[in-house]
Amino acid sequence: MSFQWSFSTDRDFRRCQRFFFFRHIGASHAPNGGWRREAFILKQLKTLELWRGTLIHEGVQHYVVPALRKGDPLNWRELADQTVVRAKAQLEFSAQKRYREPGITKGEQEDFCALVPHETGQGVSGEEFGKVCGEIRGAFGRMAGLSELWDELLGRKDCLPEKQFWVPFDHANIKVQIDLVFERKLGRPTIIDWKSYEVGGDTDARLQTALYGWALWRSKFYDISAPESIELLECQVQDSVVIKHECSQDVFDEVEDHIYRSLHRIFSLCHSKKLNEARLQDFAFTDNPNSCEHCVFRGLCVERVATVAMEEAPKVATQKKAPRAVQDSLF
């Protein structure tokens, strides 16, 4: 099993090792995968907040960038309307729980969406959906204020949205998906990372943006003479703020150190660097009861805890106890 590392992978591991196990090791798309198939379905679920951020990214990818390439002035109201139409289609897809249909794959379904409220049976009210649409329109309205950025991009044919790169590093594949990249001059690319939360909402933002530069540098996709030739821009949609981050060899060394330490923590639980040999019982529960309470894998975790307890009863007494939220669900 080839391990795919990203900043979200690292955050998942720090949030809860068992959450990490279900999402990144246990999940399998195989139709007859049993609990592994269920983990694969559950990992697709999004909260309304996360969905809103995804929709904004998709709106830029599918509507804003094509409009930029045409070179016509951007009609931000129309671009927002197109994104809202996309949101309605995804809402219907999720409401019908089509994400659970056999043979349905995310990459082949443009309307694919799996929302936590539909999975739990709570549903999404008209007021809640209206709020999501309002936030989308507000985000596009604020993006319109980044006039200098759009003037530079207008008419460019080389804007690449959601560009993926895979970089091998220390027995893992480092995966990055760059929101937008283009070559402002030969050998001088610009990376743009959209952030749909308020300034300061992600403490990893500086290093995550640097990771994109590092991966682009390592990929040799462009002929770049030095890390300093890469421009790193973090665009805060909520506040119409563009933050320029440092890109240098020192920053790249910091990125590699972060990746190495994260991989070391993860692989230390696997007894080898083959993740298919990892055991669920070697991964600790979260210490945060709120994380456990709202975890999409909670029911599956409870089930697997009970199964492992029965299979390895003599060892249970020596293992770390589950947090109270999980223990309560066992009785």
Image (cartoon, grey):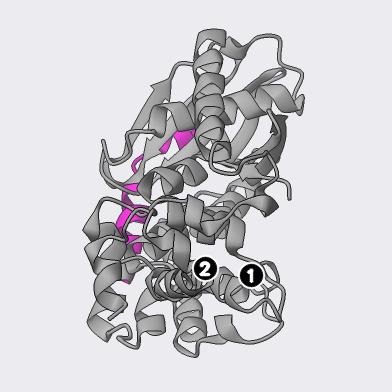
Q: For label 1, count other residues whose C-alpha is less than 10 Å away and answer few (under 14), some (14-19) or many (20+).
A: few
* Picture layout, residue 47 above or below residue 285: below
Specify which label sits upstream in the sequence, 1 or 2. Answer: 2
Q: Is residue 153 above or below residue 207?
A: below
Residue 115 found in image quarter: bottom left
Question: Which corner quadrant holds the C terminus?
Answer: bottom left
Above or below: residue 91 compared with residue 199? below
Q: Mark 1 or mark 2: which is in front?
A: 2
Q: Is residue 57 visible?
A: no
Which residue corresponds to mark 1?
Answer: 106
Element type where label 1 sits in the image: helix
Residue 154 place in picture, x, y as percent: 57, 40
Residue kind at label 2, given as amino acid type: Gln
The residue carrying mark 2 is 44
Q: Which sits in the foreground, 61 or 250?
A: 250
What is the x, y in percent for residue 251?
50, 15
Question: Magenta span covers which residues?
Answer: 133-151
Q: Are marks 1 and 2 in contact (CB under 8 Å)?
A: yes
For the point 43% across and 74% down, the residue is 306
Q: Quadrant of residue 270?
A: top right
Across and down, in percent, residue 3 comes to 67, 45
Q: Residues within 10 Å of mark 2 (few under 14, many from 20)?
A: some
| Local secondary structure at mark 2 | loop
Q: Is residue 1 left or right of residue 212?
A: right
